Image (cartoon, helix red, strand yellow):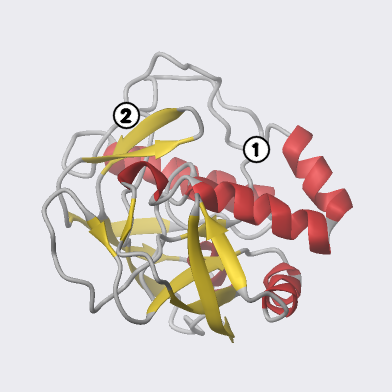
Amino acid sequence: MRVRLQLSSQATRIPWDQVLRPGRGVIYHLLEATAPELGARLHESNAPMPAGHGAPVFPNAPRVPRTYAVRGLGYLELGSPLPGLAESWHEELTRRKVLDWGGTALHIQGADLLAPPAFDAGVADFATETPVVLRLLPPNSPRTAGGEVGRRPSLPNVLPYEEGFAEALLHNLRRKLDTLKLDSDIKLSEVTPTGPKRSFAIGRGRQAGATVSVRVHGEPDSLRALWAWGLGARNSGGFGWIRR
């Protein structure tokens, strides 16, 4: 499930280093308010955080070079494949008037709970609105029973137009589904880059990636879970958010 917030702001811009960075803190604050034990367990775990978000989007804002402009009504989406979690976030957010987005006050005008598409045909066409971040898989790397590749921090990021991207993305998605105990027998087709390499601040550093569209074949429950989570790594930091 997802939550879509309708937003307004008196600000005219969001600093570029705060376009995605605040979202992870927002998610943890929501977990603390609605599911504190789960939040603590996820914070201590090495497993990927089963949640994601996009950037605040203001469709009527002017295009200004080197500026993330704000004007009129906008929206922000966040979600999780865990049953009931997005619903509890929605309930909590309907009680809030303002969202502090890295020092920019975003006034909440409304909050909608969004159910995923049915994906009854077992096919999903996903296109991301934020860059997908992925590490290149090492050749002939040992895998655990859950499909996890041993940690190799020195491996470079791989972009959608580079060799190895599709394999790394398939591994990422299967690992997520294994984490959720869903059918991970999925396949990818029509992997298409849709944007240039871009870098955004996250935590104390930066991550680079690029947007992509991809067709995923699998069980409907698995596709719905990925729709609510995102593609690639760092979804709780705002990367790989799937356009609705």
**Crowding at mark 2 (Cα within 10 Å: few <14, some 14-19, many 20+):** some
Residue of label 2: 157
Q: Is residue 213 above or below residue 141?
A: below
Q: Is residue 195 left or right of residue 53?
A: left
Q: Is residue 129 left or right of residue 22?
A: left
Tell me which residue sits at (57%, 44%) in the image. Answer: 175
- Image quadrant for the N terminus? bottom right
Tell me which residue sits at (67%, 71%) in the image. Answer: 86
- Could you say where residue 221 lies in the image, as x and y percent from the top left? 59, 72
| Observer able to see residue 4 | no
- Could you say where residue 132 lies in the image, as x and y percent from the top left? 34, 47
Residue 146's label in the rendered image is 1
The mark that comes first in sequence, 1 or 2, is: 1
- Could you say where residue 61 lies in the image, as x and y percent from the top left? 23, 72
Say what secondary structure mark 2 lies in: loop
| Residue occupying the far front of the picture | 10
- Could you say where residue 108 lies in the image, as x and y percent from the top left? 55, 78
**Crowding at mark 1 (Cα within 10 Å: few <14, some 14-19, many 20+):** few
Q: Is residue 181 above or below residue 140?
A: below
Say what secondary structure mark 1 lies in: loop
Residue type at tag 2: Asn
Q: Which quarter of the figure has residue 100?
A: bottom right
Residue type at tag 1: Gly
| Observer able to see residue 166 | yes
Residue 57's label in the rendered image is none
Q: Is residue 34 above or below residue 139?
A: below
